Image (tube, grey):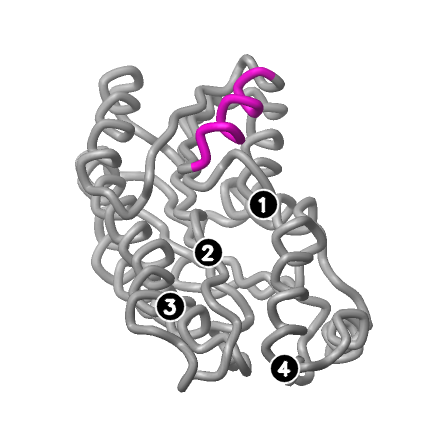
Amino acid sequence: MSRRVVITGGASGIGARLAERFAELGDQVAICDFDSAAGAEFARSHPGIGAHVADVTNEDAMQTFLGSVEADWGGVDVVFANAGTGGPAARIEEISLSDWRACLAVNLDGAFLTCRWAARLMRAQGAGLIVLTSSTSGQWGHPHRSPYAAAKWGILGLMKTLAMELGPAGVRVNAICPGAVEGARMERMLANQSKASGRDADTIRAGYADGTSLRTWVTADDIADAAVWLASDGASKVSGQAITIDGHTETNSA
């Protein structure tokens, strides 16, 4: 049976791979992304997936995107509150209030607006799955990444609370906590961390892998595998959980 799947931050990285995987399974998929160029390119290369431009921090833009999905589908089965930003890489005394707020707005406000909409529809349906993208930084913290770590900790608090609120209505809520994920976004973050810490980017890169038991980074496919499982009947009793996919982090000092 085809599911109705919404993914924020879906034009690149983890979000794009999620969209592709669920579309490959025959599901209806709609994504949004604030990057209009990336969204247009995604739409050209994925004609079967509905691609929309929306800034997750803008309530009016999200109401337009989510309202159009609701009008087309009448409901939703799986929602990924995936949109996020790495924020500044610097010591806390060097971070401006505006940069702090911008990071929390994308990661937390965007998740709130997405989940608020999903909760209303899923509570009425008596079923559904919400998955939020957190991070290992939201479990252990991360030097030079205080806004990001704080936001991702907040994501876990939101997830736990929504699992309690929505569980009696038959709605499951979980979070996925990736470690270092291969891709362009992480390459940019390595460069920013190198600048902030004065350490070589390759040294920082090696530190991420060396800080895990499996001595590895993870891929967007690894995250998609977990997401597909969470949406399956095999995970029908899984809710309120932070699923960590990171090769087992031993230390997060990178």
SS class, disc 2: loop
Residue position for label 1: 14
SS class, disc 1: helix
Q: How crowded is mark 1: few (under 14 residues within 10 Å), some or many (20 or more)?
A: many
Residue position for label 4: 197
Q: What stretch is highlighted in magenta?
A: 35-44
Residue depth check, mark 3 versus mark 2: number of the one nearer the observer? 2
Q: Which numbered disc covers residue 85? A: 2
Residue position for label 3: 151
Label 3 sits on what residue type?
Ala
Judge whether residue 179 is colored magenta.
no
Residue depth check, mark 4 versus mark 1: number of the one nearer the observer? 4
- How far apart are the two marked residues, 1 and 2, measured between alpha carbons? 12 Å
CB-based contact (under 8 Å), mark 1 and mark 2:
no
* Image point (45%, 73%), residue name: 149
Which sits earlier in the primary sequence, circle 4 or circle 2? 2
- Asked where in the image residue 78 lies, by quadrant, the reply is top left
* Image point (29%, 72%), residue name: 97
Residue 215 x, y percent position in the rendering: 82, 72
- How far apart are the two marked residues, 1 and 3, measured between alpha carbons? 18 Å
